[in-house]
Amino acid sequence: MKQDEDTMSADNLHYLELVDVARRIRSGAVSPVALTRALLARIERLDGNLKSYATVTADLAVKQAQQAEAEIARGVYRGPLHGVPIAVKDLCYTKGVPTAAGMAIHAAFKPDHDSTVVERLAAAGAVLLGKLQLTEGAFADHHPSITPPVNPWDKDHWSGASSSGSGVATAAGLCFASLGSDTGGSIRFPSAANGVTGLKPTWGRVSRYGVFALADSLDHIGPMTRSAADAAAILSVIAGADANDPTARQEAVPNYLAGLERGIRGVRVGVDRSLNTTGVDKDMVKVVDDAVAVLQSLGAEIRDVAFPSPDAVVKVWVPLCAVETAVAHEATFPAQADQYGPALRGLIEAGRSLSAFDLDKILITREAFRGRVAAFFQDVDLLVIPAQYAASPTTATMATLGQDEGAIEKLLRFTAPFDMTGSPTITLPGGFTAKGLPIAFQLVSRHMEEDLLLRAGHAYQLATDWHKRRPPM
């Protein structure tokens, strides 16, 4: 006989969506303590091979779960994260817990305070299982001393960068959701690679206080989850103004969960057929086309459009990221350059050599593109595009990417432009390759319209089940 989900043991819940687990916790059907212990046991059993965690905070997690369980028992309920085990990318400061940002130079660093996002998650009653592994400094490659996280769908395929651990742990049932960061695609690449839902909010929508910077004007913090509804639950907690971050947006934070059921009838969805197919593999093209068909069946108005060419702004993303990264690492580079891996060291050196003349040309190019994108969104509400040019690249392919002229720009073509504009995007699982590996697409909206992205993502996920597929572990 099939076991009813409401009476499932804590040992069998690891693949459920956060909002489903939250409902069971609130009703008393699931114990936060038992659930946390089950997740910790799963991490111990599986993560030796997956390498998604940099640090497991077992004692802290059990203590937080016990507090949550006691509060809920006496009728104090803080919301849908209360008692739910999650994890955060290891560039978010966590008081007294190692926070290395994937860097050998920071391996022993223990902050004396929490980042704003960690503080807000704790205030919402979330249980912190630990800190998730990432590429060095959140750039392209993992430090040579670190074993990269392994894609749970297939060990020979890319797990994404830079939020690799966040994608792997969320997909593999080692947490119910995670936080990632995105500077050129670092929420979207691992979300696509691991078959999870990733939300890159508007730049400044989520405070970056207490988060290691890669490139300040490009960095975004956002949720990586199993569904749009889960992402809505987390964004409602972590978004909003912050006195410690003068770049954080001041607008009030809505209850993103509350509006999910409104659907997308009449929403204007732009489709640039040329952009979506040029240099894009056939599996990715099919997933985007299929997603457009689903959105249309849900009542969206599909419009053929010409999106502003991203080519110029993609070309200048690397040098802009380089100079901002050089600034972020000024205290330790070049003084401790020997502790840096080759990719991050090369980026910083390039940034330090950039002239003011060249930097100003980059900034002019960026502002022009921002203006064109803002004008574009006067006529449509959403843009649908691939998550990346290739459905599921292998680790071998990604290891040689820098050797091919234009390959980096090809990889960044669908992601970096929206870090340059600060536009919000959502990455949604939309299909599988013949080999059984996940493929994703993106929706993009105007600034501060995360509610629309989440609503559209939720509507799509009610009509499909791609996001409910789990890796064969």
Image: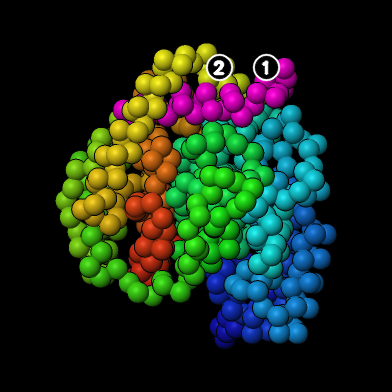
Judged by its main secondary structure, the magenta piece is helix
Image position, residue 352 (x, y; %): 55, 17
Query: Which residues are the magenta region?
Result: 312-339
Q: Coloured how?
A: rainbow
| Front-lying residue, 312 or 370 | 370
Query: Which quadrant of the figure contains the C terminus?
Result: bottom right
Instruction: Report the side of 381 relative to 28 (left or right).
Output: left
How dense is the environment of label 2, judged by Cα within 10 Å: few (below 14), some, or many (20 and up)?
some
Instruction: Name the residue type under label 1.
Output: Pro
Instruction: Report the side of 64 relative to 267 (left or right).
Output: right
Image position, residue 169 (x, y; %): 61, 53
Dot 1 and dot 2 residues touching (CB under 8 Å): yes
| Front-lying residue, 293 or 250 | 250
First reached walking from the N terminus: tag 1 or tag 2: 1
Tell me if residue 196 is in the magenta stretch.
no
Q: Residue furthest left?
A: 304
Whether residue 107 is situated above or below residue 379 in the rendered picture:
above
Instruction: Look at the numbered disc 1 and give the secondary structure of its residue.
Output: loop
Instruction: Name the residue type under label 2.
Output: Arg
Instruction: Report the side of 390 relative to 16 (left or right).
Output: left
Residue behind mark 2: 352
**Residue 148 seen:** no
Which residue: 60% across, 36% down?
A: 213
Whether residue 123 is situated above or below residue 138 in the rendered picture:
below
| Front-lying residue, 3 or 453 | 453
Residue behind mark 1: 334
Name the image quarter holding residue 18: bottom right
Which residue: 50% across, 36% down?
A: 217
Image position, residue 79 (x, y; %): 61, 74
